[in-house]
């Protein structure tokens, strides 16, 4: 729950008045004096802070989100994976122990950076960000917080797979080794050995792994 206040003004009937918003709902405070209205606004502000704190920590909110919202929208196996990420990397973390309303973008950026330094892959860090981002976005929808502070963090770059080019000798070594495993048919980079250019005795010829199929190395 977040609040916004309108300045205290004096009405035509002599009373003082101020408005405040809880989410999109507007409420009013009246008093005989300007001081009385300001004091009442401050009291309401403190009450709302205590209400927000009762939601608990970031970790508590993320768990509530997973149990009460996300669980209904994903497969059981995916939900189990989310819980594993939560228990291993969020529950006892520094951000997990922060109050939900106190969490900042700087806190999250430091958290992701520390996870990377601890050796987590970019893929794992990005998965954590997805969980945290969705939980915070739901908190915004429910007006528990004003903004999603995860929206502008910078995550580690995705890891790219780079294919390796195998020489003709490498490919034939694979073909020589695989029969030892007890079968003559394997899923491996397919080399059409009966095509002249692949069977050529020219030295230095290489082949790039472009597709996969079944090759029978016994022939």
Image (tube, rainbow, N blue to C red):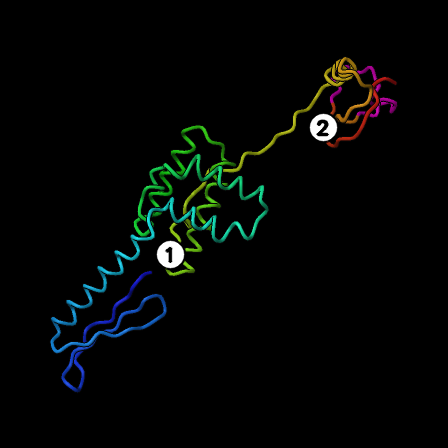
Using a 10 Å C-alpha cutoff, classify the residue at mark 1 as few (fewer than 14 neighbours), some (14 to 19) or many (20 or more): some
Expressed as whole percent of the image width and height from the top left, the position of residue 105 reads 35, 47
Q: Residue furthest bottom?
A: 13
Q: Nearer the viewer, residue 94 or 92?
A: 92
Residue at 29% x, 57% y: name it. Answer: 51
The answer to whether residue 199 is magenta is: yes
Give x and y (percent) for residue 124. Answer: 50, 36
With respect to residue 107, does 34 lie above or below?
A: below
Q: Name the image quarter holding residue 97.
A: top left
**Residue sitting nearer the eye, 153 or 4:** 4
Q: Residue at x 43, y 43 (%)?
A: 154
Q: Could you give the CA–CA distance between mark 2 and mark 1, rounded to whole angstroms?
A: 47 Å
Q: Which residue is mark 1?
A: 147
Q: Position of residue 94 (x, y in %)?
A: 33, 38
Would you identify the image quadrant in which residue 39 lies?
bottom left
**Which percent across, then down, holds residue 109?**
37, 41
166 left or right, relative to 153? right
Disc 2 target residue = 209
Report the span colored magenta: 191-206
Residue 169 within the segment the image draws in magenta:
no
């Amino acid at each position: 729950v977040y609040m916004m206040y309108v300045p205290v003004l004096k009405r035509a009937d002599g009373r003082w008045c101020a408005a405040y918003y809880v989410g999109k709902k507007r409420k009013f405070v009246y008093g005989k004096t300007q001081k009385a209205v300001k004091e009442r606004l401050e009291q309401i502000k403190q009450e709302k802070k205590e209400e927000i704190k009762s939601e608990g920590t970031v970790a508590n909110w993320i768990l509530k989100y997973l149990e009460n919202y996300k669980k209904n929208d994903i497969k059981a196996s995916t939900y189990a994976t989310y819980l594993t990420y939560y228990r291993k990397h969020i529950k006892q973390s520094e951000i997990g122990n922060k109050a939900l309303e106190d969490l900042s973008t700087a806190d999250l950026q430091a958290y992701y950076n520390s996870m990377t330094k601890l050796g987590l892959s970019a893929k794992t860090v990005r998965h954590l960000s997805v969980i945290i981002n969705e939980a915070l976005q739901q908190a915004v929808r429910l007006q528990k917080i004003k903004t999603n502070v995860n929206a502008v963090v910078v995550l580690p770059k995705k890891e790219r797979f780079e294919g390796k080019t195998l020489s003709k000798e490498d490919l034939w070594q694979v073909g020589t080794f695989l029969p030892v495993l007890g079968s003559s048919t394997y899923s491996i980079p397919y080399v059409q050995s009966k095509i002249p250019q692949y069977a050529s005795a020219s030295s230095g010829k290489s082949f790039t792994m472009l597709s996969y199929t079944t090759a029978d190395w016994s022939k």
